[in-house]
Amino acid sequence: MNKSGPLVSVIVGVNRDDGTLVQSIESLLNQTYSGFELIIVNDGSSEKVKKVVENFLDERIVLINSPKIGLTAALNIALKESNGKYIARHDAGDFSLKHRIFEQIKFLENNTSVSMCGTWIKETSSSGVDLGITPFPLTDSEIKNNILYQNVFCHGSIMAKKDDLMQLNGYREEFKHSQDYDLWLRLIESFEVANLEKPLYVRVISPDSISFVNKEEQKGYADLARDCYRARKAKIKEPLPGLESINHSSNTIKNKNRILSSYKFYCGRRLYSYGNMRLARKYFFNSLALFPFALKNVIYILITLLPQNLRIFFEKIWLNKKAKYYLRID
């Protein structure tokens, strides 16, 4: 770290502009804490993206133009070029609320044993529907007890000590997807982590999100990250050759319908959790129309029609069955 440089480096990889890039960058530049640099790696995107970034006449912005190399490699470039004590992530198209960087710096400076902290997040659909607040486990022990079974961080919301990330050699470029999850699993072996009980980041959910477009491929990488973690714990060789067996997504019409169905179901689940049964039911019906074989939509449609007391009762039964038989419904 350059002692005369910024305290924080915010790193962003960009491969396209879906119309929200300007507002996304503005959400960072308008932070209440201003002592940071913003490193944007233009990952082989159009000239339009380059012009959007260059139009910001802000000396805190560092633009790195690169041929198409993928998000993982782009983040490693930004990480190596950064000068901050802390590294903050931000995904292009998402939004950081104005106190985000200040709150995370305050937490890390006051809790020096913690290497990385994320935040709770707000989620919104690409059409502007409020999908509510997504909580995550808060303490180091809660996160480590749950990390193999659920998502415990939003990648775009994290802030971490650069020295600790560099000690792990950053992101592993073998991981085209779930590179963040692999990093978290390596980080928790040596360092403490946490989440702030504040929604300081807004994640925009769209059908083009990697979580939908490359759902099965992403799951394959996540499973491999878990296998590597277990191998390290057992002090045996990591099964990285397993990368070759990961299925890659196709672009058939059937698959596109399934992607859009998954997006609609996700929005429905978020609205269901948020208590908006009427709108959730609409999304479940839309998801079912796109992919009629998804039984989970039928189950949720029926549950949304129940009175609240019966809905809570059936939720408990369903969740117990899910845990007992390892059912994947989300």
Image (cartoon, rainbow, N blue to C red):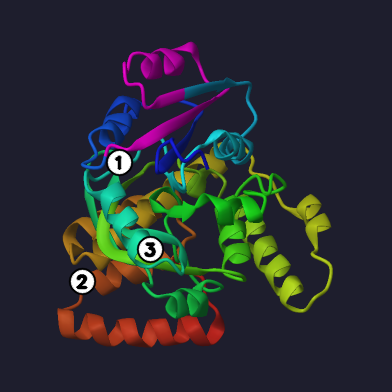
Occupied quadrant, residue 33: top left
> CA–CA distance between discs 3 and 2?
13 Å
Asked if residue 152 can be seen in this view, the reply is yes
Nearer-N-terminus badge (1/2) = 1
Q: Which residue is mark 1?
A: 95
User: At numbered mark 1, what does the secondary structure look like: helix, strand or loop?
Assistant: strand
Occupied quadrant, residue 222: bottom right
Q: Which residue is mark 2?
A: 305
Name the residue located 32 percent from the left edge and 81 percent from the top edge: 315
User: At numbered mark 2, what does the secondary structure look like: helix, strand or loop?
Assistant: loop
What type is the residue that disc 1 sits on?
Answer: Phe
Q: Residues within 10 Å of mark 2 (few under 14, many from 20)?
A: few
Name the residue located 68 percent from the left edge and 49 percent from the top edge: 172
Q: Tell me the magenta residue range.
A: 34-62
> As rendered, which of 23 and 222 lies closer to the eye?
23
Above or below, 36 against 49 in this view is: below
Residue 157 drawn at (x, y percent):
38, 51
Nearer-N-terminus badge (3/2) = 3
Q: Is residue 7 left or right of residue 276?
A: right
Asked if residue 93 can be seen in this view, the reply is no
Residue 113 drawn at (x, y percent):
46, 69
Q: Which mark is residue 297?
A: 3
> As rendered, which of 170 and 85 lies closer to the eye?
85
For the C terminus, the quadrant is bottom left
